[in-house]
Amino acid sequence: MTNCQECERIAGYSHGLRETLMTGAETKDEGDRAARDRDVQELDQVVIRFAGDSGDGMQLTGDQFTRTTALMGNDIATFPDFPAEIRAPAGTIPGVSAFQLRFSSFDIHTPGDAPDVLVAMNPAALKVHLPLLKKDGILLLNTASFKAINLKKAKYEVDPRTDDTLDGYRVIEVDLTERTKEALANCPLDSRGKDRCKNMYALGILYWLFHRETEPTEKAIAHKFAKKPDVVEANLIAMKAGHAYAETTEIFQTAYKVAPARLPPGTYRNIMGNQALCLGLVAASKRCEVPLFLGSYPITPASDILHQLSGYKHHGVITFQAEDEIAAVCAAIGASYAGQLGITSTSGPGVALKTEAMGLAIMAELPLIVLNVQRAGPSTGMPTKTQQADLLQAMYGRNGESPMVVIACSTPADAFEVGYEAIRIATKHMVPVMVLSDGYIANGSEPWRLPAVDELPPIDVRYAPEGEAGVKFEPYKRDPETLARPWAKPGTPGLVHRIGGLEKQDGTGNISYDPANHQHMVDTRAQKVANVANDLPPLEPVGARTGDVLVLGWGSPRGAITAAVTRMQQQGHRVSAAFLRHLNPLPNDLEALMRGFKRVVLPELNKGQLALMLRSTYLIDVQSYSQVNGQPFRSQDIQDFLEKVLEELRG
Amino acid sequence: MTDVDGRKITKRDFKSDQDVRWCPGCGDYSILNSVQAAFADLGKKLHETVIISGIGCSSRFPYYMETYGFHTIHGRAPALATGVKLSNPDLDVWVVTGDGDAMSIGGNHFIHTMRRNVGLKVLMFNNRIYGLTKGQYSPTSPHGKVTKSTPMGSVDHPFSPIALALGAGGTFVARSVDILAPHLQATIKRADGHGGTAVVEVYQNCNIFNDGAYKHFTDKVVRSERMVELRQGEPLLFGKDHTKGIAFDENFQPYLVEGDDLGKAYVWDEAAASPAPAMALATMDESRFPVPIGVFRRQDKANYEQAVNLQVEHAKSTTQQSLEELLYAGEIWEVS
């Protein structure tokens, strides 16, 4: 096993080394009833991966387990891993959809490197995900799908259950299809409808195995299929049948418990990144009393932002599903010009199309929020896989000298604060802001400690007041502190003026080709962005402010970096981590922090884009640790890399 | 402060302090003049009027108007204007564009504006050439046109902006000509009165790169024979003393009538349920038939910004939710 603290805890579980508790003393509530006659073992954490066909309902199953577990007070992190195809051919490898979740009794930062439990609904799911499963891990197989044709589709020459493929795993074989059919013998659904309930049968088995309450799922299913009572009934019967099956048969010798996590006191809800981002934007909009306007065009993995905000009309949110990406951003600019908070949401290919319009917003000096939920590129790339390779596009992907504020969220819950911050910056400084998220944050989830509404920082938006008689309005007359120009809403008497993409004379806004003015305006637009750094809070590193190695991170690798660095600190290494929310401008105290360490390491899911920026900005030899395979970092890989760096330092 | 108190607004009030920089003799001057005159007649308020343009000679228009103005990027003016109109439906939003801007790079936004019926007034200056880039053929240049980029003649087929607007569901589609100031002003005023998207194609002469493109039917000498004005409820007649007319056969093909057949001339109805007559006129062969000007089609239809804002207002009146209730929603739990 590894030397990592978290993994040791799992090792304890996997090898059954931990003290085994008898259940007699535990049967104090319904949740424990299930395990009356079996051993119950207490664990610190478990990683489960559900895998099956796209049509097998694995995302729903994972989502139900997540909700239940969050409500039971565990810390939790999730990682949906699904194909772009809505329904790839059944039973094939491209059609495999998976959902990994990790829950624990302590504070965790990632959905786990490797699962302890794999539910494989068919041979293709087994083929794709077995290599990830820990040795001695639990493997639940649906035997009904291990037919010759499915084995062939999964490219198994022989049934993996008959050779040594599954050696070293604790294999549980259940004919989920047949068991579900039997349980639903009296239900009015047709045989296809019944077959669709087999994921709930599997969920029931896992609920028993991990002492989960079934009530939250009963409620959720009743709500989700409210108009289809037969479907609700069948799903719940299947779940209960699975639960009863695990309880009464002796497929498991032991059931497991994971105590609630010791999270900081507060009120929590489980949240996905796209959801949190939307809530941050709406919260800021309510706080500054300026309505939100979203112009968007559907694109994976950003579409959920459009869906969610379209449901917030009662908060005054206007959503506009445009004819294309360009119309989406242009409408958002139009909304900002008219005095609303213009936002556009997209992913990398969409940002490419919006490039020219972002330049217009920079030139017109209007607030605009561009949300880029990054995915694996280039071109169409791998739409459902994560990557952070759009940083340089965000920084430099426009014609001319066109600096733009760039900020990034690092976890699902962090996306709330980042959405809020984007609006604060855009309105205070009258600049467009690019927000970088990614597929891993967007669709991943974690418990979110809800902020007290009255403690949200105020955002003070002031439009230009009505003009005075005889005074010509100057649309580019600047605030001396921020250099922001006034936000002059059409409809306001006395402020008529013209703006546009042509270079403007500072102050009057008249078209100007004057060389000195152009130099001045280029410098001013750059200074406006630089000024954003003036009110950033100091960086708060994880660990000491000086030492051997500083691990810098931005975006979604935060969790994996924190896990790796925390373990190494516990082993006595002088390693710290710091995370950048603000990428342009960079925080004023970053350079000093970097210079306090012998080495600076920067793990990124790209070919070293922030590393390139930092090296050129500070002339510091930042060491890039790059991974671009569409998957999030495994914390162990980061730790292995850091150990090598430390060895070099010693050598 | 330039708004007019206690005095009737005049054409001069709409002139900005910027020097107009179109080529001397450009048709854009007369259009600017007609717009300023029509706006004054309509008693528009400077601060409630917004003019949004794309890129091209026509798109310099906002700089010369003493109203709110936004000179945007190539082809995107309707999209940006849609955002403005959705955010503040009370504003009077005009889009000024050209045949390259609206028909080529911005074709998508043009048709979707029609489809949604956003309450925008679109003035599309059609000079059948790219002027600002110095003389390449445009999507409305005739087949065979020799330009800088088509030295052997264009092999592209042009399309009719009117037919395109009709096909996209346009609810107010009209055509006028730069030099016909009274007709142009009347058409602008009718567009102003329309609730949804109003498109006015304005034939505009580019005296530098495509001089005389419309001369064969707009010239005073031939005008009465070569143009037909669409008048609501009146037959399609043209020629000196209105002695010729346009009729449709059973296949809705237009043909010319005169003499005893003049009574067969089609009685124009811009509000007809079917767009077929308008489409037939919009696609008539310019060499064989007179060129129609006037309102091709006018339909009353719910407009987009009102429908969008109605949903928002309805949601606000039926669901009150504080920010706290929004955040503390769904399944929440306490950790103490």
Image: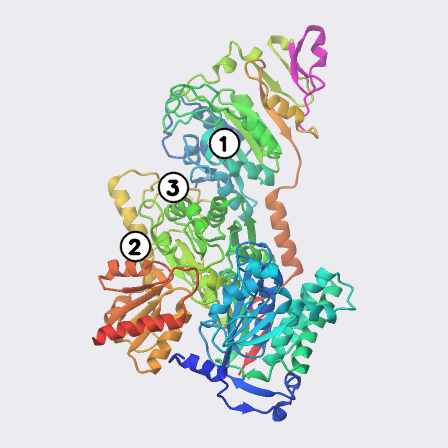
Place of residue B324 in the rendered image (x, y in percent of width and height, measured from the top left):
56, 69
Q: Which residue is mark 2?
A: A527
Quarter where residue B239 is shown: top right
**Residue B252 on the magenta span:** yes
Placement of the N terminus of chain A among the 4 image quadrants? bottom left
Q: Residue at x 50, y 66 (%)?
A: A129
Image mark 1: chain: B
Indicate left or right for A474 with B317 as reference: left
Q: Which residue is mark 1?
A: B103
The boundaries of the magenta stretch are B244-271
Residue type at tag 1: Met
Question: Residue A501, labelled with which disc?
Answer: 3
Indicate left or right for A365 with A76 as reference: left
Q: Does residue A157 sit above or below B115 in this rendering? A: below
Q: Residue at x 56, y 83 (%)?
A: A257
Q: Tag 1's secondary structure? A: helix
Image mark 2: chain: A
Q: Residue at x 45, y 82 (%)?
A: A11
Report if residue A491 is visible in the image: no
Place of residue B133 in the rendered image (x, y in percent of width and height, measured from the top left):
37, 29
Callouts 3 and 1 on one subunit: no
